[in-house]
Image: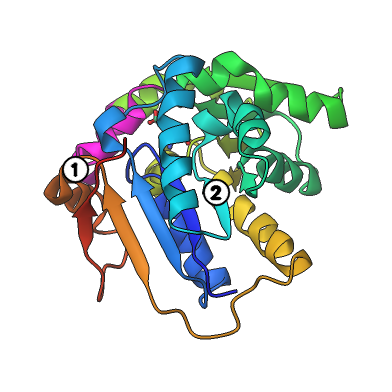
């Protein structure tokens, strides 16, 4: 029960998932890895993504974690099945199914799925939605400029020019938006100013319910107060901390560098 949950993403984006875990499951110990050395993941091939993800999964297995969360839509939509097949003794989950469930439960049609180029190319979101209800109208849009703007911290100055360029043509046309990249909830308030009065579905929040259900079913929820949250980046610790300060609470926590083989 006290074993940690291993969580990873290409950078600071997956910390939005850690935020959700901290509020829904505050007892859980967490080890987080931001793979900034390879960031962004969105322009990588499935072969590259599998190689990065399997290195991290193996590290987590060495650390004896109780489950691994792909806090990343890009790896969830491209290499999750393969990771689950190769590391079949470990519980490994991704964000797509939980996000689609959340979307379906809200009964809102006309949705815009925004995600990285690799996630959009995989068609995983529209395919999963249409398997459940083929009549739902979906639009898919790759928004590759957003992750670098978050990772560089430039989003803090406001990035409305880019948001208008991406979203103006959807205003009035959609009733909901799926933030299909864990970096995007960081931009939610800014996106809301360009696309107001629609429903926002976030993969970072949706996944947490799923984590809780799985741990509950295996009787693995930690009943003791947590002892640690470890945050690692394969990139520069100062940059990582700068771009995530503002949406992530570092009280009592530090960011450490890690090399993944
Ligand atoms: N935050 C990740 C995702 O949800 C990866 C983004 C990227 O590195 O391109 O897709």
Read off the magenta span: 143-161
| Residue depicted at x 50% and y 27% | 115
Foreground pick, 177 / 89: 89
Count up the numbered dots. 2
Foreground pick, 261 / 107: 261
Q: Which residue is mark 2?
A: 69
Residue 36 picture location, percent across and down? 27, 36
| Residue depicted at x 62% and y 51% | 207
Q: Which residue is mark 1?
A: 157
Q: Is residue 128 above or below residue 197?
A: above
Q: Are marks 1 and 2 in contact (CB under 8 Å)?
A: no
Q: Is mark 2 within 8 Å of ligand 1?
A: no
Residue 140 picture location, percent across and down? 59, 20
Residue 129 picture location, percent across and down? 77, 29
Q: Secondary structure at mark 2?
A: strand
Q: Which secondary structure is most common in the magenta stretch?
A: helix
Disc 2 crowd rating (10 Å Cα; few below 14, some 14-19, many 20+) is: many
| Residue depicted at x 53% and y 75% | 2
Q: In the image, is 261 to the left or to the right of 188?
A: left
What colouring does the structure picture have? Answer: rainbow
Query: How far apart, in angstroms, are the residues tagged by discs 1 and 2?
Result: 31 Å
Is residue 3 visible in this depiction of the protein? Answer: yes
Residue 142 picture location, percent across and down? 48, 19
Asked whether residue 149 is drawn in magenta, I would say yes
Q: Is residue 127 above or below residue 152?
A: above
Q: In the image, is 33 to the left or to the right of 53?
A: left
| Residue depicted at x 46% and y 42% | 58
Asked whether residue 175 is drawn in magenta, I would say no
């Amino acid at each position: 029960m006290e074993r940690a949950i291993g969580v990873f993403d290409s950078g600071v984006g997956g910390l939005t998932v850690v935020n959700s875990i901290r509020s829904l499951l505050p007892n859980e110990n967490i080890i987080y890895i931001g793979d900034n050395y390879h960031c962004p993941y969105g322009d990588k091939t499935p072969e590259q993504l599998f190689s990065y993800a399997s290195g991290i999964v193996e590290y987590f297995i060495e650390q004896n974690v109780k489950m691994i969360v792909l806090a990343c839509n890009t790896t969830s939509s491209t290499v999750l099945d393969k990771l689950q097949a190769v590391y079949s003794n470990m519980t490994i989950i991704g964000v797509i199914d939980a996000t689609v469930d959340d979307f379906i439960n809200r009964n809102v049609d006309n949705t815009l799925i925004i995600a990285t180029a690799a996630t959009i190319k995989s068609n995983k979101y529209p395919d999963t939605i249409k398997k459940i209800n083929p009549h739902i109208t979906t639009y898919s849009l790759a928004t590759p400029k957003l992750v670098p703007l978050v990772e560089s911290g430039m989003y803090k100055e406001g990035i409305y020019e880019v948001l208008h360029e991406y979203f103006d043509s959807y205003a009035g046309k959609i009733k909901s938006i799926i933030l299909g990249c864990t970096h995007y909830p960081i931009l939610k308030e800014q996106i809301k100013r360009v696309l107001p009065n629609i429903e926002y579905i976030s993969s970072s929040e949706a996944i947490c319910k799923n984590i809780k259900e799985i741990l509950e079913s295996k009787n693995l929820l930690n009943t003791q107060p947590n002892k640690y949250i470890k945050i690692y980046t394969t990139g520069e610790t100062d940059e990582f901390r700068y771009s995530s300060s503002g949406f992530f609470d570092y009280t009592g926590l530090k960011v450490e560098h890690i090399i993944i083989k």
